[in-house]
Amino acid sequence: MKRGDMVLISVLLVAALIFLVPRWLGGSESEKNHKIPLTATITVDGQLYKTVELTEEEQIIEIKTDHGLNILKVHDYGIEMIEADCPDKVCLSFGFVDKKNQSIVCLPHKVLVELEGTSGGVDQDETDAVVN
């Protein structure tokens, strides 16, 4: 390799590091600042049970019905089912959901949790422009 090749490779590596290092050091904060505010709509047996705004603060929601008990945990701008007394416990496998249009379902207890964007954010499904 010639000296010019080494200089070119060094310049490219430095340029790549300049762009990548800030993302590694503080990328998560920037993403949270631009996150669309979400709400979780909880329905039991097709009827609205509760609507919850997803915030960073921890909040526990207990859903006691004739069908059984489900416990939801709101934290870090998302929600997850942390406990259920249904026989199959499939609802626990949905994990932490924090994106619009995701859901958690517990069929034996007829519980449905749907995430929706609020009017304060930009809706990704809306038309941006129409061109003739």
Image (cartoon, grey):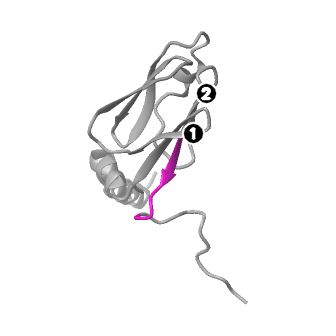
Write down the quadrant of residue 45 in the picture. top right
Number of residues whose C-alpha sits closer than 10 Å to that of mark 2, classed few (under 14), some (14–19) or many (20 or more): some
Where residue 10 appears, as percent x and y from the top left, is: 36, 55
- Measured in 3D between alpha carbons, the distance from the residue under mark 1 to the one under mark 2, in whole angstroms, is 10 Å
Indicate the quadrant containing the C terminus: top left, top right, bottom left or bottom right: bottom right
| Point 44% across, 30% down: residue | 80
> As shown in the figure, which amino acid type bears the numbered disc 1?
Gln
> As shown in the figure, which amino acid type bears the numbered disc 2?
Lys
User: Which label's residue is closer to the chain start, 1 or 2?
Assistant: 1
- Tag 2 secondary structure: loop
- Closer to us: 28 or 21: 28
**Residues at discs 1 and 2 in contact (Cβ within 8 Å):** no
- Tag 1 secondary structure: strand
- Closer to us: 55 or 112: 112
Magenta includes 27?
no
Pick out the residue farthest to the top: 87
Q: Which mark is residue 110?
A: 2
Asked if residue 102 lies left or right of residue 57, the reply is: right
| Point 42% across, 35% down: residue | 79
| Point 50% across, 22% down: residue | 65
Where residue 38 appears, as percent x and y from the top left, is: 43, 51
**Residue at numbered disc 1:** 47
Q: What residue span does the magenta drawing correspond to?
A: 114-120
- Closer to us: 73 or 6: 73
The answer to whether residue 17 is above or below residue 49 is below
